[in-house]
Image (cartoon, helix red, strand yellow):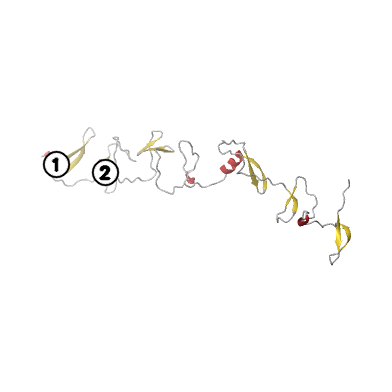
Amino acid sequence: MSSKVPVRTVFDDGGNATGLAEYQTGEFIPLSHGGIGAALSIGTAGQVLKVNSGASALEFGAVEAIINIDTATNLTGVTLASGDQFMVSDGGSEGRATLAQIQTAIKDTTATLTNKTISGSANTISNIPTSAITFASSSITGITSLTAGGITITGNTITSADSTVIQMGESLSITGGLTQSSNDIVLGTNTSGNIMVADGSKFSSKAVSALAEITSVATDDVLMAIDTSGVVVLKRLVDQH
């Protein structure tokens, strides 16, 4: 059967029917009289007939799936796999993507963690440069052992990871007492036979011969001498009378 053009009644200005005529281009039957409310041309492949954005007529448009999450199968107790798929909108283009893609997108996105706890027993944080670490507080708690380069700090003990000397690049100020466990103190100059002499602000290695000569002595003066074995001997003059 060939396509037919519908006809309509023609009315004059007074509303009186004067005859019949074919529908003209652009004319349509309104919704209130059982029509579609628009003069339409056929849509493109895959489009469907739907209500327009103004909810006033019908039009051809793309299929838009509606997912009712409330009535969907409950998968909240299921362990998701990297190949599981999700509906996503990529700049207005709707489609599907895998959980692995979403994980990669989240991982590659810079984010600031606030009030988060990272379990040291279940996670390893590595390759973090010193320049990337900022402490908001001067106190770090919960660390039993810390190794940085060749230095290991455990409790109140600082040791060298390879059992060598720990070097201080700057002057070291100690407010408490200093306990020397070994019998040796190594100075910058360690000439055999020298002694440590204080000058009011520090100790230095000095040869005994470099000390100022005493021009007069009293009976209660204390003298220092080195005997033939190289041992330093202190004697009060009064003890020698």
Q: Residue at x 76, y 57 (%)?
A: 32
Which residue type carries mark 1? Leu
Single out the residue that lies furthest toward the bottom.
14
Give the CA separation, mark 2 to mark 1. 21 Å
Q: Say if 59 sits above or below 231 in the image.
A: below
Could you classify mark 2 by the number of other residues whose Cα lies within 10 Å: few (under 14), some (14-19), or many (20 or more)?
Answer: some
Quadrant in the rendering for residue 101? top right
Which is more N-terminal, label 1 or label 2?
Answer: 2
Which residue type carries mark 2? Val
Instruction: Kindly identify which numbered label has been placed on residue 197.
Output: 2
* Residue 112 x, y percent position in the rendering: 51, 47
* Residue 185 x, y percent position in the rendering: 30, 38
Q: Say if 138 sits above or below 233 in the image.
A: below
Quadrant in the rendering for residue 196? top left
Q: Is residue 186 left or right of residue 66?
A: left
Q: Which residue is more in the foreground, 59 or 156?
A: 59
Quadrant in the rendering for residue 188? top left
Q: Which residue is more in the foreground, 221 or 32?
A: 32
Instruction: Kindly identify which numbered label has been placed on residue 237.
Output: 1
The mark lying in front, picked from 2 and 1, is 2
Q: Which residue is more in the foreground, 91 or 79?
A: 79
